[in-house]
Image: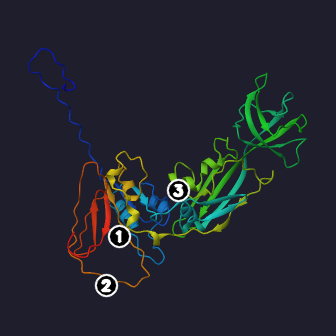
Amino acid sequence: MTVPGLRLGAPGVYPSVQRAEPPFQPVRLDVCGFVGIALRGPVNTGVLIQSWSDYQRTFGGFERPGGGPDRMLPYAVAAFFAQGGSRAYVVRVTPVGSDLAAAVAACASYQLGALQLTAANEGSWGARLDIQLDFQTPQSFVGQRDPDLAAALLVPAGAEVPVGSLLRLRGSGPAAAGEFHWVAGLGRDTAGQPLITVDPPVGAIVAGPLDVDVVTAVLSVADRDPDFARSERIDGLGLDPRHPRFIGDVIGDITDAIECGPGDHESSLVRFAVALTGRLTPPSPLLPSLSATPIRPGTDRWDQIDSRSFFDDDPLDTDPLDEQPHQAADLMARQDEIGLLCVPDLLWAWPSTAPAAARPALGLAVHRPCGGAGARRAECLLRALPRPFVRRRTGQVRRAERAGGTP
């Protein structure tokens, strides 16, 4: 057998190459991961939070679920930042076994013209939204029909009209309010002047100057939360899928948000109910505004959350390459930046309507921090004798009942 790095020659004794020890990598203890129950915010997605106000904006405050016990998550996050914490990642847990249809149905929905929008994530908070879509003309110039091409329009140098833009043309041919035409392509005529091809062609418009308005959309959303008001205004939105700021891409759809997380979409309050893939034409060339009307309120599903919501069903070591989706604490444990992992709502439970059973006397509770190379997750062992007990085994928290004796 040949030792790597060792070159053999004549028989004799040769020194082996000394391998360098890996450098020590300190772990920051001021970056914490929190997993718990929130009233709003992305579910089962680690969200970077850098202040208490960041947390309030994304996940809400200390509000108590109606009919349920207090949640410990906001208190833990508030204490972390009050004591000097600088960065935290927060995961909002979701009910166990929740499918896509149930998650979508838990989001408030609205009708906006011919479109449907939903709140960006589940919960009754989504019923407080005011949504309006306005159309504006941030750019106007004088164009001229190309005498050789009915579908082409000569535009002045410097005009910024990307493919997919909506134009409102007004001149001697169009109606007084104007006509809509879509930019299908860009080019130059034989003299080098910029031109655009439009759909439909401008053949019905007689030769002469045309007033050209570039039409974009502005989406305004206001959250009437009495404790922490939020609002957003997203402008410069294109109305055709070929536009670089197509409204369907900038806002996103709720199915993608649930399955893949919030992503880099610009709205934190709304999503389209279904993916928008076609053109969105204003109601008329007068560009009237559209206001959304409620369809259904959002639903809070706190009563479906229990200790199973916080961990994967499978042991930690069943996915060593992280190729499968994970949830809650097992998801957060894979965030390399965190040095601490806190699960303050692990024992949270919705009050049962069944008569309360007599609880057995509990023995001594023992807390034991557990290490383990590469196992970056909350390690906690609670033992209550003789029953029930919480057992930590192969990366899972499993609740077990025994007829008697000790675990």
Q: Amino acid at mark 2?
A: Ala
Name the element at disc 1. Answer: loop
Residue 43 x/y as whole percent: 48, 59
In primary-sequence order, the first of circles 3 and 2 is 3
Residue at x 74% of width, y 36% of height = 184
Dot 3 or dot 1, earlier in sequence? 3
Left or right: where 395 falls relative to 162:
left
Q: Amino acid at mark 1?
A: Leu
In the picture, measured across the screen, residue 33 lies left or right of residue 235, that is left
Q: Inspect this view and state whether residue 87 appears.
A: no
Q: Which residue matches tag 2?
A: 358
Give the residue type that dot 3 points to.
Ile
Residue drawn at x 29%, y 51% is 375
Q: Which residue is mark 3?
A: 258
Tag of residue 347 = 1
Q: Are marks 3 and 1 in contact (CB under 8 Å)?
A: no
x and y percentages locating residue 346 in the rendered image: 35, 67
Helix or strand or loop: what does disc 2 sit on? loop
Q: Is residue 95 left or right of residue 289?
A: left
Quarter of the image containing the C terminus?
Answer: bottom left
Nearest the camera: 281 or 18?
18
